[in-house]
Image (cartoon, coloured by chain):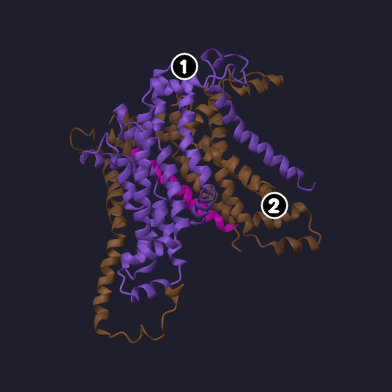
Chain colours: A purple, B brown
Amino acid sequence: MRRLPAYALVLLGALVMLLPFVAAFGNSLKSFAQYIQVPPVWLPDPVRWDNYAEVWRRTPFGLYLANSMVIAVLAVAGNVLTSSMVGHALARSRLPGRQALLTMALGTMMLPTVITIVPNFVLFRSLGWLDTMLPLIVPYWLATPFGIFLMRQTFLGIPRDFEEAAGIDGANPWQVFWRIHLPLAKPALATLAVFTFMASWSAVLEPTIYLTSPENYTLPIGVMSLKGEFVGNDQLVTAAAMMSLLPMLVVFVLAQRYFVRGAVSAGLKG
Amino acid sequence: MTLLTRKPGRVAVAPPAPLRGRRTGERAWALAFASPYLLHLVALTAWPVLASLYFSLTEYNLITSPRFVGLDNFARLFADEVFWRTLGNTAYFAVLFVPAQTILALLLAIALNQRLRAMALFRAAYFVPVVSSWVVVAYVADAVFNPQFGIANQVLGWLGLPAQDWLQDPALVIPTLAAVAVWKGVGYMMVLFLAGLQAIPEDRYEAAKIDGASAWNRFRYITLPGVSGTTFLVLVLTSITTLQSFEQVFVMTNGEPHGASEVTVLYLYRHGFQFFQMGYASAVAWVLFVLVLALTLVQFRLQRRWVHYA
């Protein structure tokens, strides 16, 4: 009974969190006439699942989905690999200046993205990368400060005995890293993977700046571009938005605990 | 576990001669491992900082090479009413959003920390907006705040209150955006606070209870100081990101109505990527950078007064 106010608050909050999704999902199943009906109809009648099929038929949704998938998968692979390599060097090697590198990584987490927008555009333009996926992938292959920090902390927590034993067996540092340390760091790798996936999947600014041909669009900006095409068919754009959420939602449901863990370790960085 | 059972003394017996070669080899490996970040530092940190500083002193349209103009961009910037209005809009948004999100996140974390049943389920519910992109959120928010067929006006109608234009009302657009931003971000901050709360030793509460401290006093003298470190972190993180918020406004209002929701990064984006005034856009970026830096430093300064580290 004592916990009743707590339950009430949390339950009310959860409703506020989820009801808008339910309403938007309902909207995506309406006809346009019902979509704009005043006062709003909560339950679509009839339920037009065909809206979703229509999005597939009438828009390059599948193409946007494929683009987003390719970019997200390559971004995740790159960030997980390179951030753990750098994190490993900072945690385990006697590399001169590794403390300075760590400080810089922490410092650049504070560097506002606004500073980098224009020069990065100029850089990628001079490399001939405009309207390609490269500006959305390659930065993740150069390790991210958050990833470096997370992986460094993880590798610091692995007892040294492991690698000493492996070193005696004649393994080189790459083999120690790949065969011994990475498998032990799986939870942190999963955390880094889900956060990178989320950042890549939801990005709006970078794809807007770098991608100009519609066939290169990712899901967020692809769905945004439908808004102009489907005037008077907002239920279809809503359906497209709901569909673009689905892969993210699947990742979230499967990897929920890694999201929580990542949120906490991001918090510890300060 | 067989890896751990090495014979003692074996390492010490190793001859000293190859050790030197081994150390150089080790360094080369370490350098190879660190190389992605070294490249990152050059290409994605040093270059942008120096280049944008340089660009901010030039006129640069991407077609002809940058032409040095001194502080002209800054003079033009500070004389532009629109720029000041975007700063005002950004500040207004931050003043509404940051405290609201912080307080709500703390309250929810305290409630969830009462060892509620189905806590993981609730936490998941609060995280769904966090993982949604702003494009998805824009459509979800439209279901709520659409002036004609949104739920919000329907609810106001039930309560006998007049309908509002929300995102289309110049006076309401920023509060509405801030409310949506709180809705999207509160789950993430709540998880941070939950971690902070769980780090407060249980025996402090026990001792206070024995001493007869009221629930309010336990909150005031144990919980609040206990999460002050987390609160500080949340405040620093959110104010840094809030001053640079772009995606939400870009997707939801694009600065409308009549520039009432035009924020500074949107202004930067227009000048840089619609008018291709890269020098001017860089000047905007630096002004914003200095503001972010100043705010962060002030927050670090003030933290001594109210942050308790156990």
* Residue occupying image coordinates x 38% and y 68%: A92
Give the residue number, with chain letter if any, for mark 1. A233
The image quadrant of residue B39 is bottom left
Q: Secondary structure at mark 2?
A: loop
Q: Mark 2 falls within which chain?
A: B
Element type where label 1 sits in the image: loop
Badge 2: few (under 14), some or many (20 or more) residues near its Cα, within 10 Å? few
Q: Answer with left or right where residue A228 lies relative to residue B169.
A: left
Residue B251 visible here: yes
What residue is drawn where x is 55% and y is 26%? Answer: A24
Q: Where A268 falls versus B258 (above or below)?
A: below
Q: Is residue B218 magenta?
A: no
Question: Which residues lie in the magenta part?
Answer: B283-306
Residue sitting nearer the eye, A94 or B287: A94
What residue would you read off at disc 2?
B115
Q: In the image, B156: left or right of B302?
A: right
Q: What percent of the width, then of the height, locates residue B306?
A: 60, 56
Q: Position of residue A79 (x, y in %)?
A: 36, 51
Q: Is residue B224 left or right of residue B74?
A: right
Name the residue located 35 percent from the left edge and 54 percent from the top edge. Answer: A81
Q: Residues within 10 Å of mark 1 (few under 14, many from 20)?
A: some
The residue at the point 24 percent across, 81 percent down is B18
Most extreme residue toward the top is A33
Disc number at residue B31? none
- Chain of the residue on which disc 1 is drawn: A
Q: Is residue B293 found inside the magenta-colored segment of the image?
A: yes
Q: Which residue is more in the foreground, B303 or B111?
A: B111
Kind of residue sitting beneath label 1 = Asn
Give coordinates of residue B135: x percent, y percent: 46, 31
As drawn, is A102 to the left or to the right of A43?
left
Above or below, comparing residue A101 to residue B66 in the picture: below
